[in-house]
Image (spheres, helix red, strand yellow):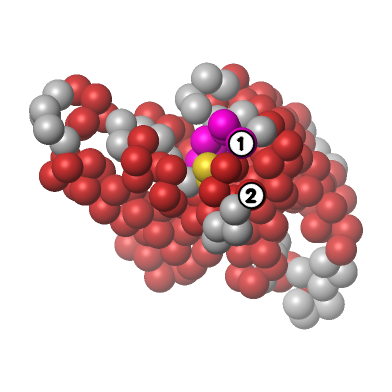
Amino acid sequence: MTEETEKYSFNSFWKINLPTRNILIIIFVVHITLWIITLVQASDINFDAFYYISEDLLIKVGQANALVYQGHVYQLISSIFVHFDWLHLVSNSLFLLIFGLKLEDHLFSWQYYFVFLISGLMGGLLTLTFGAGTLSAGASGGVFGLLGADVIIIYQEEKDKKLWVYLGIGVIFLVMTVGINTNVVAHAIGLLTGFLFPVIFKKRRNQETD
């Protein structure tokens, strides 16, 4: 087995791909926990209870702008790891894998986490302008930040057709997430934020031995 094959094998994923793995674990644990609570609290076990997270829980741990205005600023971070339903979770997780694993080749772990969290946070801050009645959640702002960093690094270091492949995948991601209780504006600011980090990070993983 080659080094590249080993890097992306199932077993090595849990040993090597730390940032992507850790974020995936967090968002799945959070979602499953909220899903179980939704089922326990549901007065009628139906499709909605199995598929959606209850609105009461989303208001507490997602980004409810009215509560953030009142000082619950933790929601700007907690909402990044919360998803409305199973499709929302799976779509974000899929593209986290696509963009995140590629980025792990280029950034140190702390840089990766920084890109993800700050991009997600910027999406949340911009969402505050939508008014007190807005309820938002999801990792897509952070995932778009990873995509933005990927695109710039590929342009800087590889300058090949992979740039267009990643842009195409990004467009697919954008189309898939439209209407899944997320907002395109947060995606856009996440993407733009991600563009900045490869310029800011002068020393990156693949430059460690230079």
- Where does label 2 land, which residue? 69
Tell me whether circle 1 and circle 2 mark residues in contact (CB < 8 Å).
Answer: yes
- Where does label 1 land, which residue? 132
Q: Is residue 34 left or right of residue 158?
A: left
Q: Nearer the viewer, residue 80 or 44?
A: 44
Q: Quadrant of the C terminus?
A: bottom right
Which circle marks residue 44 in the picture? Answer: none
Farthest residue to the front: give it. 70
Q: CA distance from mark 1 to mark 2?
A: 8 Å
Dot 2 falls on a residue whose secondary structure is helix
Res. 5 in view: no
Residue type, label 2: Tyr
Q: Is residue 88 left or right of residue 189?
A: left
Q: Which residues are magenta?
A: 132-140
Q: Is residue 3 left or right of residue 65?
A: left
Residue at horizontal 68 percent and vertical 32 percent from the top? 130
Q: Position of residue 71 (x, y in %)?
A: 60, 58
Q: Residue 174: which quarter of the image?
A: top right
Q: Nearer the viewer, residue 38 or 165?
A: 38
Is residue 133 located in the magenta-colored stretch of the structure? yes
Residue type, label 1: Ala
Residue at horizontal 54 percent and vertical 48 percent from the top? 67
Q: Position of residue 83 (x, y in %)?
A: 42, 40
Q: Is residue 27 left or right of residue 200?
A: left
Dot 1 falls on a residue whose secondary structure is loop
Q: Position of residue 16 (x, y in %)?
A: 47, 68
Residue at horizontal 69 percent and vertical 57 percent from the top? 118
Is residue 111 located in the magenta-colored stretch of the structure? no
Characterize the magenta stretch by its predominant secondary structure. Answer: loop
Q: Earlier in the sequence, mark 1 or mark 2?
A: 2
